[in-house]
Image: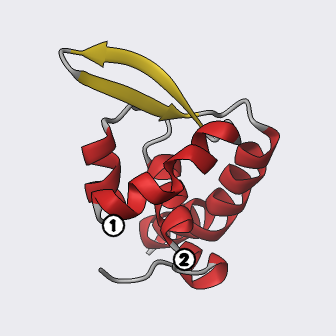
Amino acid sequence: MEQTIFTKAMGNAPKIKVLEFLIEGRELDYSISDIAEGAGIGRTTLFRIWNDLIELKVINPTREIGNAKLYQLNQENPFVKKMIGLFDSLVIEPLNKKKKIEMVH
């Protein structure tokens, strides 16, 4: 999996990969399997860091579908807010600027 500017700046640790995945899809909720797959890490690795994410309130449970519990990024968490701002400034804003330049040409 190719590193993005966010993981290049922040590191390639599993927590960073999970954060990046959840920030990109911040309006959606995901199962544990979806989070592991989307972040490009194994479920075992995700389970190793899971309690930290819950205890720090980085993620919140949202609902259950059958046996699957779904989780979403906690956008009210001050740390998460700062990470979203950093992600947007590193990834989203440059993309928007690039689109504007392409539209002018």
What residue is drawn where x is 41% and y is 52%?
47
Q: Find the residue positioned furthest to the right.
A: 78
* Residue at numbered disc 2: 7
Indicate the amino acid at tag 1.
Ile
* Residue at numbered disc 1: 41
Q: Is residue 31 visible?
A: yes
Pick the front one: 91 or 34: 34
Horizontal side of residue 45 vs 87, given as left or right: left
Indicate the amino acid at tag 2.
Thr
Mark 1 secondary-structure assignment: loop
Q: Residue 68 has which mark? A: none
> Vertically, is 82 above or below 6?
above
Mark 2 secondary-structure assignment: helix
Q: Find the residue positioned furthest to the left.
A: 66
Neighbourhood count class around disc 2 (C-alpha, 10 Å): few under 14, some 14–19, many 20 upward? some
Horizontal side of residue 60 vs 86, given as left or right: left
Q: Quadrant of residue 7?
A: bottom right
The image shows a total of numbered marks equal to: 2
Residue 79: x percent and y percent? 78, 48
Residue 18: x percent and y percent? 47, 57
Q: Is residue 27 visible?
A: no
What residue is drawn where x is 47% and y is 66%?
17
What residue is drawn where x is 70% and y is 46%?
80
Residue 66: x percent and y percent? 18, 15
